[in-house]
């Protein structure tokens, strides 16, 4: 059975750096999007050897050339033929069919480590390859990728949502640590919930910030990014440290009049943002009330404003 060796950084007195040691696993990437080349580049720093990648779009070719220079772009089946460890970094909806196709065509080799990076799936999606003798791992980096070299640096300290068979837990942990990450074990049945939680925070945060910047420009702010940076940085830090205790603002205070003014202005200048504002305000009010931050006597008027705010005037 092919398994990666112990974490190269586990012995602080080890005299040789990863780049000075012989390569141990050949690495292939199927899907040279934003994630795959960065992970392969980080594995290369740990002493492994990227040997092949697949990518079709111009952006994929550029990413591979930047992060994996001298690594040839070949068809997906050829990636599997050359690599001991294959990173399947394709969209979630593509992954099941891709794995089935590899298994049906005999592209999967016994003992081959097959690693997907989907947040949604655990290892069950790799069952066709498992039946062909592959070793399945689900390693999802909880990070937003840019498709540039900065991603390799950002992997340091990044949490990975890991699902693996019991006999491969040490191998999964070693790979994550070699990439600079921290493994968080996610049960197969909890993968969708885990991924929903990340999407709720990270993906919706981008939407909220983009809308906030647009509204600030509408209000005459020349540098909305500079204005929001310190505010949002402090809010994020406080929320991570204190949870609901970090709630501030008119909703948490029960300032119904201020919230009503917000809704009126949004309806006038950016009606497309009203539904999102109201939904988040209601969620904030519920949490503030449940945690004793919003006084019950103020909540009634506030909730009334939020209830009527959906009615266009």
Image: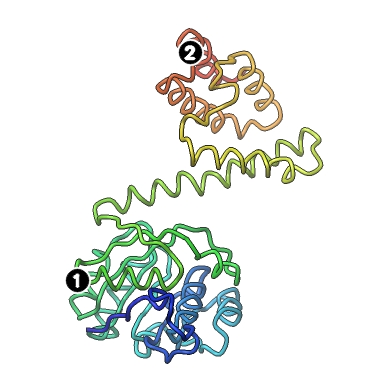
Which label's residue is closer to the chain start, 1 or 2? 1
Q: Residue at x 46, y 23 (%)?
A: 288
Residue 276 sits in which quadrant? Answer: top right
* Frontmost residue, 72 versus 44: 44
Q: Residues within 10 Å of mark 1 (few under 14, many from 20)?
A: few
Please determine whether, in this image, residue 83 is positioned above or below residue 299. Answer: below
Question: Which quarter of the picture shows residue 98?
Answer: bottom left
- Res 187 → quadrant: bottom left
Q: Viewer-proximal residue, 47 or 219?
A: 47
Vertical placement of residue 71 versus 278, above or below = below
The picture places residue 159, in percent across and down from the top left corner, at 42, 58
> Residue reaching furthest front?
13
| Residue ranking furthest to the top | 297
- The residue shown at (48%, 10%) is 300
Q: Tell me: residue 290, above or below residue 54.
A: above
Q: Secondary structure at mark 1?
A: helix
What label sits on residue 108 in the rendered view? none
- Which residue corresponds to mark 2? 295
Give the labeled residue for mark 1: 167
Q: Position of residue 82 (x, y in %)?
A: 37, 90
Q: CA distance from mark 1 to mark 2?
A: 52 Å
Residue 94 appears at what percent x and percent y? 38, 66
Q: Which element is circle 2 on?
A: loop
């Amino acid at each position: 059975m092919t398994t990666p060796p112990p974490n190269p950084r586990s012995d602080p007195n080890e005299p040789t750096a990863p780049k000075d040691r012989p390569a141990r696993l050949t690495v292939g990437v199927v899907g040279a999007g934003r994630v795959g080349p960065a992970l392969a580049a980080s594995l290369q720093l740990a002493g492994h050897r990227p040997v092949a990648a697949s990518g079709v779009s111009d952006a994929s070719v550029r990413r591979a050339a930047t992060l994996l220079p001298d690594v040839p772009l070949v068809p997906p089946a050829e990636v599997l033929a050359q690599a001991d460890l294959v990173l399947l970094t394709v969209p979630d909806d593509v992954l099941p069919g891709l794995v089935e196709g590899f298994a049906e065509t005999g592209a999967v080799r016994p003992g081959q480590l097959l690693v997907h990076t989907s947040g949604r799936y655990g290892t069950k999606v790799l069952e066709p390859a498992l039946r062909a003798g592959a070793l399945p791992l689900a390693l999802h980096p909880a990070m937003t990728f840019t498709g540039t070299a900065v991603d390799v640096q950002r992997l340091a300290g990044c949490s990975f949502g890991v699902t693996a068979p019991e006999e491969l837990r040490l191998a999964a942990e070693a790979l994550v640590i070699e990439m600079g990450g921290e493994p968080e074990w996610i049960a197969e049945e909890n993968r969708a919930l885990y991924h929903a939680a990340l999407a709720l925070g990270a993906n919706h945060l981008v939407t909220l910030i983009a809308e906030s910047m647009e509204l600030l420009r509408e209000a005459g702010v020349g540098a909305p990014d500079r204005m929001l940076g310190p505010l949002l940085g402090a809010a994020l830090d406080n929320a991570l440290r204190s949870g609901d205790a970090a709630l501030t603002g008119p909703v948490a205070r029960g300032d119904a009049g201020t919230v009503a003014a917000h809704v009126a202005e949004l309806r006038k200048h950016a009606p497309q943002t009203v539904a999102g504002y109201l939904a988040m305000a209601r969620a904030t009010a519920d949490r503030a009330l449940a945690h004793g931050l919003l006084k019950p006597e103020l909540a009634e008027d506030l909730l009334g404003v939020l209830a009527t705010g959906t009615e266009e005037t």
